[in-house]
Image (cartoon, helix red, strand yellow):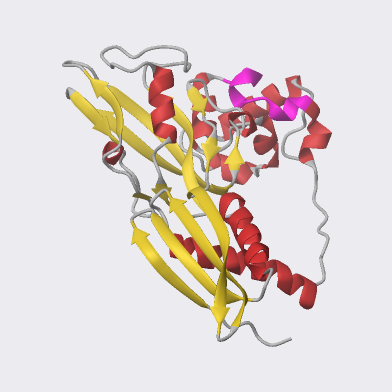
């Protein structure tokens, strides 16, 4: 079979939208490419979203904040619509601290340098005079859709959010006949791609093609799959492993220090080394003994 030769032309290019024409394609390849590219665009491109929110003075989402026009549910829905550019592997924290009246916009989220906001003028809430909004959000990179139920049980007041990571909002494609010399049985693939502004449609098209190439390469030149043996700490701990550190009877000071250091569950705590825990701020040898006793009462041996 001859190497495929075709062109990609951007007929319309705007912010967050493009109409791309791929032609000429052998008959039938318009649908073959169009369908596979569309599926990858909608399901497999990476993005970033807010997955957890903590609002000062608010313990759950079904409440209100004094002086804020929107209720907490509305505010959370608006946070889910903020679009971020971030490709780091670890979650990052960002803050909102507003003490003046007026509109609170996405640009008021104080993000680290590795994160950019694609829709900075998007309105999150409206504050009255004398009111205050103090919130912390967690931004995570991922693909597809992640329900709030998948979040690890965190600290009191932490509200988990559903997250849609995909930077693609909509994709359409259609096939038209095109001519090559005297032959008229070639396909013209017309792709329309809408994005959230964190990636251009043309970049999204290239990224989806690279994803497909990676899969096809595994068919052409397969790499051996190495099965790694993993230790399942959760299996040995059972339901106790999912308990948060606040639920095992630790003093508030010790529990808060553990959470700030990233040890939020019994499972994470048991997997930690004692020498690492001693280095945690506000913890020491005495605190380690308190932790050992609390875990022992739950039937868990600590620091084997």
Residue 208 in magenta stretch: no
Seen in the picture, residue 231 relative to 11 is either above or below; the reply is above
Picture quadrant where residue 96 is located: top left
> Which region shows up in magenta?
239-250
Who's the residue at 58% across and 83% down the image? 5
The foreground one among 42 and 64 is: 42
Who's the residue at 40% across and 44% down the image? 83
Residue 264 at x, y percent in the picture: 59, 32
Query: Does residue 24 appear in this view?
Result: yes
Is residue 242 found left or right of 147 in the rendered image?
Answer: right
Residue 286 at x, y percent in the picture: 57, 29
Seen in the picture, residue 74 relative to 204 is either above or below; the reply is above
The foreground one among 65 and 287 is: 65
Is residue 210 found left or right of 16 in the rendered image?
Answer: right
Query: Does residue 87 appear in this view?
Result: no
Residue 245 in magenta stretch: yes
Is residue 41 found left or right of 83 in the rendered image?
Answer: right
Who's the residue at 29% across and 11% down the image? 66
Residue 255 at x, y percent in the picture: 54, 26
Q: Main secondary structure of the magenta part?
A: helix
Seen in the picture, residue 87 relative to 134 is either above or below; the reply is below
Quadrant location, the N terminus: bottom right
Residue 277 at x, y percent in the picture: 58, 40
Is residue 130 found left or right of 146 in the rendered image?
Answer: left
Q: Residue furthest front?
A: 182
Who's the residue at 40% across and 53% down the image? 198
Quadrant location, the C terminus: top right
């Amino acid at each position: 079979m001859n190497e495929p030769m075709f062109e990609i032309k951007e007929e319309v290019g705007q912010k967050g939208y493009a109409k791309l024409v791929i032609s000429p394609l052998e008959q039938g390849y318009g649908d073959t490419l169009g369908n596979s590219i569309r599926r990858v665009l909608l399901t497999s491109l990476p993005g970033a979203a807010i997955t957890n929110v903590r609002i000062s003075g608010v313990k759950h989402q079904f409440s209100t904040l004094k002086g804020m026009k929107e209720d907490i549910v509305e505010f959370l829905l608006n946070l889910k619509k903020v679009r971020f550019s971030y490709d780091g592997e670890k979650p990052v924290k960002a803050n909102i601290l507003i003490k003046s009246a007026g509109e609170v916009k996405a640009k008021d989220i104080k993000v680290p340098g590795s994160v950019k906001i694609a829709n900075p003028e998007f309105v999150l809430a409206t504050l009255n005079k004398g009111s205050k909004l103090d919130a912390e959000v967690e931004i995570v990179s991922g693909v597809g859709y992640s329900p709030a139920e998948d979040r690890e049980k965190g600290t009191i007041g932490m509200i988990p959010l559903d997250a849609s990571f995909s930077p693609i909002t909509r994709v359409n494609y259609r096939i038209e006949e095109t001519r090559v010399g005297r032959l008229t049985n070639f396909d013209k693939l017309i792709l329309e791609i809408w994005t959230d502004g964190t990636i251009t449609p043309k970049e999204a098209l290239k990224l989806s093609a690279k994803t497909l190439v990676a899969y096809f390469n595994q068919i052409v030149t397969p790499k051996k799959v190495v099965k790694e043996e993993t230790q399942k700490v959760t299996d040995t701990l059972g339901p106790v492993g999912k308990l948060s550190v606040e639920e095992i009877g630790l003093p508030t000071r010790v529990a808060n220090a553990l959470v700030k250091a990233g040890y939020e569950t019994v499972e994470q705590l048991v997997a930690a080394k004692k020498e690492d825990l001693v280095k945690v701020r506000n913890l020491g040898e005495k605190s380690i003994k308190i932790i050992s006793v609390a875990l022992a009462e739950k039937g868990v041996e600590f620091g084997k």
